Amino acid sequence: MDRLYPIFLKLTGVPCLVVGGGAVATRKVQSLLAAGAEVTVISPACTEELLAWAEAARITLKRRRAEPDDVHGFRLVFCATDDPAANQALAQAATAAGALVNVADSPGLSSFFVPAVVNRERLQIAISTQGAGPALAKRIRRQLEEYFGPEYDLVLAVEAFLRPLIIEAIPEADRQAVFGRLAECLPELCRTAATPEELRQELAQLLKIPLSSDFAQLVSRFFR
């Protein structure tokens, strides 16, 4: 069994091809659009969502059957038709052209798998079973979504604000311990703080560094 290498890709402006026009293809396109990819869809029949995205010029839609030559020029290729032979031919052509390929319900033809993902504002947790158990991956995702709740949007906004302050104020020899203490305490502080000011005071006491009013302004949207 091949060992997978987990990775998060920046897809802004990256040309990606989705072959197929059904529900599976639509989910692939939705995720690609959310990541900023340039998406082309090839399929003679399409869902209403795909037609609407094409009408709004969010995707390029070609209403026909895909041919192996169509894969050239794309970095990622998703094969999601209901024709196994067509999926195989397209996957082989895409691999030969140097693209990464995902074939729906066919792990053996895929060079990458789309994980189940816990999505917060900054936090992403991906779960993969290497295509063996998509339903199990979704179940694990739901469990993680319960554990890593919406408060983690606030946790990571606070982390991003505090990190440069800690680097500036804390000697290098002590920073690792401070960051470790912050990682341990911050989720609970963000869950229990009733107001931005209360959170600011708790963190200032924990870190022993002053926090300006900019902090409360930054996090105020999470308390509405």
Image (spheres, rainbow, N blue to C red):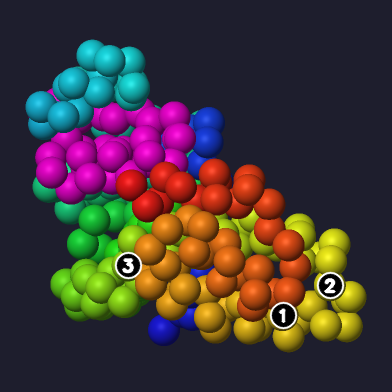
Q: Could you tell whether 118 is left or right of 166 in the image?
A: left
Q: Which comes sooner in the sequence, label 3 or label 2?
A: 3
Residue to which mark 3 is pinned: 149
Give the percent coordinates (x, y) of residue 86. 22, 45
> What type is the residue that disc 3 sits on?
Gly
Q: What residue type is labelled 2?
A: Ile
Q: In this view, does 43 lie to the left or right of 58?
A: left
Query: In the visual, does 210 lie left or right of 69?
Result: right
Q: Residue at x 33, y 47 (%)?
A: 224
**Residue 146 visible in the current orientation:** yes
Q: Does the stretch in magenta take in 69?
A: no
Q: How far apart are marks 2 and 1 (CA)?
A: 8 Å
Q: In this view of the protein, which residue sits in the foreground, 214 or 53?
A: 214
Q: For the point 37% across and 35% down, which residue is it?
A: 33
Query: In front here: 147 or 124?
Result: 147
Observer able to see residue 115: no
Q: In this view, does 174 lie to the left or right of 24?
A: right
Magenta residues span 18-45
Which mark is on residue 170? 2
> Which of marks 1 and 2 precedes in the sequence?
2
Q: Residues within 10 Å of mark 1 (few under 14, many from 20)?
A: some
- Picture quarter with the N terminus: bottom left
Mark carried by residue 118: none
Task: Please tell me how crowded label 3 is: few (under 14), some (14-19), or many (20+) other residues with Cα within 10 Å.
Answer: few
Q: Nearer the viewer, residue 152 or 116?
A: 152
Label 2 element class: loop
Q: Do the residues labelled 3 and 2 touch (CB within 8 Å)?
A: no
Residue 178: give its label.
1
User: Is residue 70 placed above or below 105 in the rendered structure?
Assistant: above
User: Looking at the picture, how far across and down is residue 94, in whole percent?
Assistant: 43, 45
Callout 2 touching callout 1 (CB < 8 Å)? yes
